[in-house]
Each structure stands twice: as structure tokens, then as C-alpha cells.
Image (spheres, grey):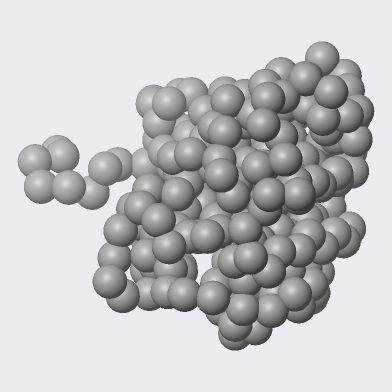
Amino acid sequence: MTFSVSARCARTGMFGIAVSSSSPCVAARCAHARAGVGVVATQNITDPTLGPKGLDLMAQGLSAAEALARFKAEAPHFEFRQVVLLDREGRVAGHSGTRTLGTHAIATGTDVAAAGNLLASLEVPAAMVAAFEAEPEAHLGARILAAMQAAVAAGGEEGPVHSAGMLLVDTVGWPVADLRVDWTEGDPIAELAALWALWQPQMDAYVTRALDPSTAPSYGVPGDQ
């Protein structure tokens, strides 16, 4: 019911993940990232606890592959899970359990991995990786959205998707972007792209307001004198 892309920007060290699904509020369950550590996508019959657990393991120094090996040894019901981990070096590891739903696949590239289940085609994750790699100088958020749009163009899920989200982490201890379309009868990925177009020009200013309000730009709202 889900396809996702997990990625790292080698130039800035930023990490990000985007995910879409036919089910509501997909990003709340499936998208996990931590500044300086990496990304975990946990999907299919989702176990949300694998996100923080994977990030903790990678924060302790385990590689993506080593963290995945721990999951395989210790995580209950792992045959139902589809999981992707991406570590601070951009190394990726992926798992599709034997009980993964429908047509499913994982594709990897430089600093990126895409995964999906109940897909219209096995080629969807590969198309996502190719789109991400096509513009290496673009902002990580734009590259991630390009991958999601490529998924749709390649057929996406077998059925319609209704929710989407994108999470970006940088050098501060909170997400610099946490954008969500929790349910729509329209096109959640197009709506997510519109949210990104609204948020990106303001994103750095909100970080500045948190770190040093005295140097932040004005709020630009009525009553801000």
C-alpha cells in the first residue's frame, strides 16, 4: 500500500524521506529521520517502532546493513515488514519480507533507496531512483519530490493513493520540514509539492527564529510592527 524514497544530500549532509499510500496519515507511521544519523522507512504491514530503533542503532555507529541484520535477528513478525535504512555515509540496506503485499521491489542508488509494495510495476522504485539521481545539484527536497512524481508516472500503486508526507532533517535537533497530506481524494503528491513550494522559501527563516530571534526576518503578518 506504500511507496517511499529515502535519501541523503552528500553536499549538505541533509537527510530526507517521502512516502505515499492509499491509507491515511502514512508519514506519521512510516517516515523516520534524524539529523547526523540517517533515515528509516518502515512500511507494508507497518511496525512504527522500527523507525526509532533503527535510528538509535545507527546513532550508536552501526551501518545500515548492520542495523538491518539486528532487525532480522530480533524484530518480531519481520516477514511482514518492508524496511529501508540509509546511514550517515549514504549506505543503504533494504528488506522485503516474505509476507510483503502484492508486487514489491526495492531499488538503490547513490545516497538513495526507493521501495514499494502493491505496486503497478516492479519498475516503479527504479524510476524513482533515476529521477532522484538526475539533478544532483538541486535541493534535497526537490530531488525527493521528483522521485515521488516519477513513481506516479511509472504507475505508482496498483490503486489510488490518498496520503503523502516528506520529512527533512539538517543540522538542528528538529525536522526542518515535516509536510503532510494526511488524506485527500485528489492527488496527494501534487498537494505535497504545493506545500513544499510554500514552505521552502520560509524554511531557513524558521530555523533562524529558533536559534537567534534577534537576527530573524520579520513575521510579515498583520500586527507585526
Q: Picture coordinates of residue 165 (x, y %)? A: 47, 53
- Quarter in which the C terminus is drawn: top left
Residue 69 lies left or right of residue 211; in this view the side is right
Q: Nearer the viewer, residue 216 or 15?
A: 15
The answer to whether 69 appears left or right of 201 in the picture is right
On the picture, is 46 further left or further right than 9?
Answer: left
In this view, the residue farthest toward the top is 60
In the rendered image, the vertical position of residue 165 relative to residue 57, given as above or below: below
Residue at left offset 40%, top offset 31%: 209
Q: Position of residue 192 (x, y in %)?
A: 42, 63
Image location (x, y in percent) of residue 93 = 85, 44
Residue 15 or residue 106, whichever sits in front = 106
Residue at image location 84% in from the left, 23% down from the top: 73
Task: Confirm whether residue 40 shows in the render.
Answer: yes
- Give the camera-side residue of 93 and 146: 93
Determine the image quadrant of residue 101.
bottom right
For the point 52% across and 60% down, the residue is 1
Would residue 62 appear left or right of 78 to someone viewing this image?
A: right
Q: Nearer the viewer, residue 155 or 223?
A: 155
Whether residue 131 can be seen here: no
Taking the view exactly as shown, the residue that stands out farthest to the left is 223
